[in-house]
Structure formats: C-alpha cells, structure tokens
Image (tube, rainbow, N blue to C red):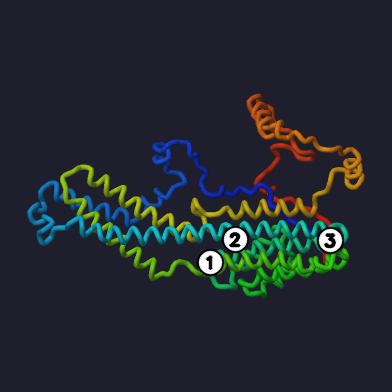
Amino acid sequence: GNHTLVAFSHLAARAMTFHYDSDRGLLLTALSLHGTVIPKVLQSRAFWVFFCFHMIVWLSFRFGLMGKRELDPAADFGLDWKFVGVITSITTFFEVFYSQQCYGRYQTLYKTFRGMIEDSFAFAYLMRVHVGEKSQSSVRLSIRYMILSMFLQVFEMKSVESGEDAIGHAGDNELAGLVKFGLLKPRERDAMAQVHRKHRAITALNWSASFALVGAAESKGPNNIYGTLSQKLFLIRSGQQVIIDTLSLPVPFQYFHLLTTMICANLGLWAFSMGLTDSIFAPVVFFFASLIFIGMMELSSDLSDPFGDDEVDFPVDAWLADCVESLVEIIEGSYPGGTDGMNLAAAEEVAMPREYREMHIFREVTALVQQAVDAGTPPPSPPGRKRGNTSSDSRLMLLEGGEGG
C-alpha cells in the first residue's frame, strides 16, 4: 500500500477569541452581547437569586414594609456602608488577583501550544533539507507520527479537563477517528490501544524519532543532524508536558472556595444595603455591580482552561488544520518545473534593485487589491483548483508516496 499523509483543509472551526473593532466606540462596544460573558452571567442562578433578594428588600423599604428607623445604620438591623466597604475591598483584591493568575495561565498555554507548532515546522524543514528526496518515505512517516502526537496531545488535554479514565471507550473512539482520517493505520491503532492514554502522545513522538533517524542515516546527512532533529522533537514533547502540567494545576480549590464565599457575602450585603433607599436607581446600580463581579469570575474561569467551547477558547481544530497543511506543503512542495525550473530561474535571476524604500510596495499592492475588490474582479484561482468546489465532506487532501508496510 501507499503511505497517506492527511492534511485537513478549510475546517469549519470557530475563530479564536471574538474579533472586535476597537474603533467602534464606547457605547456600541458596551451594548454588544455577542462574544461576551454577559449571556452566561444572565443565565446564572446566583445572579438572579441575589437580584431578587435585592428587589424584595428595595420594594419592602420603598412601600413601608420595613421600618426606616429600625434600619438606621446605628440601629440593630442597620447596615453601615463602611462595613460593606471592608468586604468589598478585600473581595475586589482577591478577584483581581485571581483574574491575573487565570490570564497569565491563558497566555502560558497560548505561547506553549503555538510554540509546539513552530517547533514542528522547524523539524519538518530540517527533514526536508537534510533528508528530503533521499528518503522521502521516512520523511513522510516521521511527519505523520509527529502530527499524530499533536492530536493525541489534544485528546489527553481533554481527558485531563474531564477527568476521564486513561483507557476506555473514549480513547478507543479517538483512535478510530484518527484511523478514519489517515493519521493511524489499523495495525498502528491496535498497538496504540495497548498504550496508556497519557503515554500515547510520547509514543507517537518516539515513532517519529525512529523514522527521522532512519531517514538521516539513509541520506548520510551531517553528523549533528541526529542531535538537531532529536532536540526539535524534545521541544515538542516539552511543550506537551508544560500544557498537561499547567492544566493539572489550577488555582487551588481552597482559594477558589474562599473567593466564591467572599463574592456571595459581598453580593448579599450589596443587595441588602442598596435596597435601603427610595431611589429608583438602586436596582440599576445593583444589577450592573453584580453583573461585573460575577462576570469577572466567569471570564476568569473561562481563561483558566482555554481548550473548550467558550468564546475565549483556542480554536485548536483550526490551528491543527493550518499546521498540517503547512507541514504537508513543507515536505511535499517543490519548485515549479523541478530541477530544470530551478536552473532556468538561476540563469534568469538578476541583481535586485536598491531603491525599495521609494517603491512603497505594500501600499501600492494594497491599493491594487482594493481596486480589484471595488471592481468586483475575482482573484485568479490557483492552478489545478476549481473555485467553489469545496464540500463539507471534502476536508481532506491526500498526498501519497513511498511504499507502505
């Protein structure tokens, strides 16, 4: 058979983090609901419990059901805003600290995951340059197993998030899906099924390293190529471990529990103290104050684990699809016309001009593109590709080569 390397093309994945226009203006931005945490807050039971409690207190006070003298700050059931301010100050500090920790974790996970993709590109370039056509089958196998490792890494992250057992129906279904998309062969699936789920990503990297070393030996590359290739794979594995360790160590529950308790106490005190007034603006103030407090907690929780389906979560599907397409292009792409085309290009190449500063290339090209858009002229289709002939089932581009085993 033929070894088949699968590249996911144009996956229908969500865009990462809702894209917004910072020039839209304060009012329009504030009134936006799509891509915000406000819908989630408004679906929260806690929000409406505290708001209803506030409305009961406010209406009771407004219609005289609660004696105003008994509710004087100096009375038994009075509540001085100075007392509320103490809890509010402490809660605000704790919530800001929690938000900073969650956002720092979010940035760490982003940089680490994107760094893994960059390291995979570097590995593919090294394989292309030093192994290349001398052992193309080893290149393809090594890259496929590296891609397989990255997908298994994502599945492992999901298992850490959901707390699933290491081996079970979920893991078997994942392997079956990878076979469907050509990243695993049936006999490889059988071998991988025997591996503990948290070890599958590193097992695939071991397979990748084995064929990388075989290809390097067959191509008789430089002596340091073995260490260089191994180092790139080690960087990928290191990034995988950093992500797993980060997901496995959230903010301690004791801190989260204490913060949640403080927020509930603060909202309860707000609901009562803000209700002790005849002003019709009290419910409005409490509504937005509680919306902000609970919204910050919801947003921080979403940032702490960005590998899900929330608006702020990473589009892992799209990232991996772009990564696979780029890797395939790196190892399979060739210069137009092959060797003859390269020789012709070298013969025709002349010295580059030195006055690029006066050319304003980017501005002029952008102007040409805008002119074409205004004129309704469609861009030229790439050779061999028909426009508008992409279906939801044709997500895969199969590149065959080399003899399989």
Alpha-carbon span between mark 3 and mark 1 = 35 Å
Give the mark nearer the N terminus: 3 vs 2: 2
Q: Is residue 173 visible?
A: no
Name the foreground residue: 162 vs 66. 66
Could you tell which of marks 2 and 1 lies nearer the N-terminus? 2
Report how many numbered discs are placed on residues in the image.
Answer: 3
Q: Nearer the viewer, residue 261 or 103?
A: 103
Which residue type does callout 3 highlight?
Val
Residue at position x 32%, y 60% in the image: 91
Q: In this rendering, is residue 136 above or below 37?
A: below
Query: Taking the image as drawn, is residue 212 in sight?
Result: yes
Q: Amino acid at mark 2?
A: Thr
Q: Residue at horizontal 55%, vertical 67%?
A: 159
- Tag on residue 112? 2
- Considering only vertical position in the picture, is 11 above or below 219? above
Q: Nearer the viewer, residue 7 or 134?
A: 134
Question: Within 10 Å of the Cα at label 1, are there few (<14), some (14-19), or many (20+) other Cα atoms?
Answer: some
The crowd level at tag 2 (other Cα within 10 Å; few <14, some 14-19, many 20+) is some
* The furthest residue to the top: 375
Element carrying mark 2 = helix
* Distance Cα–Cα, label 2 vs label 1: 10 Å
What residue sits right under mark 1 in the picture?
Answer: 246
Q: Residue 66: horizontal and vertical position, in percent?
A: 11, 53
Percent from the top left, x then y, of residue 64?
A: 10, 49
Judge from the rendering whether residue 338 lies leftward or rightward of residue 178; answer left or right. right
Which residue is disc 3 drawn over? 131
| SS label for mark 3 | loop
Cα gap from disc 3 to disc 2, whole angstroms: 28 Å
Quadrant of the image occupied by residue 34: top left
Location of residue 75 in the rendering, given as x and y in whole percent from the top left corner: 9, 59
Amino acid type at image mark 1: Thr
